[in-house]
Image (spheres, rainbow, N blue to C red):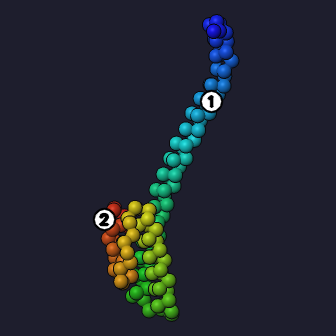
Amino acid sequence: MKPLALLFADLTKYTGLIALGFALIVNCWRLALARAEQKMANSAFATLALQTRLGQLSAELRDLETCPSYARSFKVQAASLAYDGLLAEACKRAGISPDPQLPCQDLERLRKERALSAAGWSW
């Protein structure tokens, strides 16, 4: 059995290491919180950018449907594919589970738009 003075001397020998370890843990925790806050901020801006792009593509599709132009069908097809891709990304970001493909792409697009609108999205 060691005398109390020796036990106290052993304890003070490791106090610096304990304090360093505690400071390291606290700094790692602060770094993790800062990263989580940054991720949330980036997520909000990414969602806003996605909604903005959905609105732009929606307007472009409306314009292409009414305006006769050279190679209109190809432009409509390209814009529709881009719009469907953004809708799928928006559904994933909003947590909307994908249903089995409907027989018509227009019905699937309408289902996704309604689900996003119900989730509070607007574009």
> Identity of the amino acid at label 2?
Ala
Q: Is residue 81 above or below residue 51?
A: below
Q: Is residue 19 left or right of residue 38?
A: right
The residue depicted at 39 percent of the width and 82 percent of the height is 105
Label 2 and label 1: CA atoms lie apart by: 49 Å
Q: Which residue is mark 2?
A: 118
Element assignment for label 2: helix
Query: Quadrant of the image for the N terminus?
Result: top right
Give me the residue at 62% from left, 30% from top: 21
The residue where tag 1 is placed is 21
Q: Quadrant of residue 122?
A: bottom left
Return the residue nearer the eye: 5 or 68: 5
Q: Disc 1 marks which amino acid?
A: Gly
Q: Residue most toward the front?
A: 1
Q: Position of residue 10 (x, y in %)?
A: 67, 15
Residue ID at (59%, 29%): 22
Q: Is residue 8 left or right of residue 32?
A: right
Out of 122 and 108, give the one closest to the viewer.
108
Residue 109 can be seen, yes or no: no
Please indicate, yes or no, whether residue 90 appears anywhere in the rendered image: yes
Foreground pick, 116 / 68: 116
Q: Residue 7 at x, y = what percent?
A: 64, 12
Foreground: 6 or 79?
A: 6
- Front disc: 2 or 1: 1
The answer to whether residue 79 is above or below residue 34 is: below
For mark 1, give the secondary structure.
Answer: helix
- Which residue shows up at 37% across the image and 75% down it? 100
**Residue 8, located in which quarter of the rendered image?**
top right
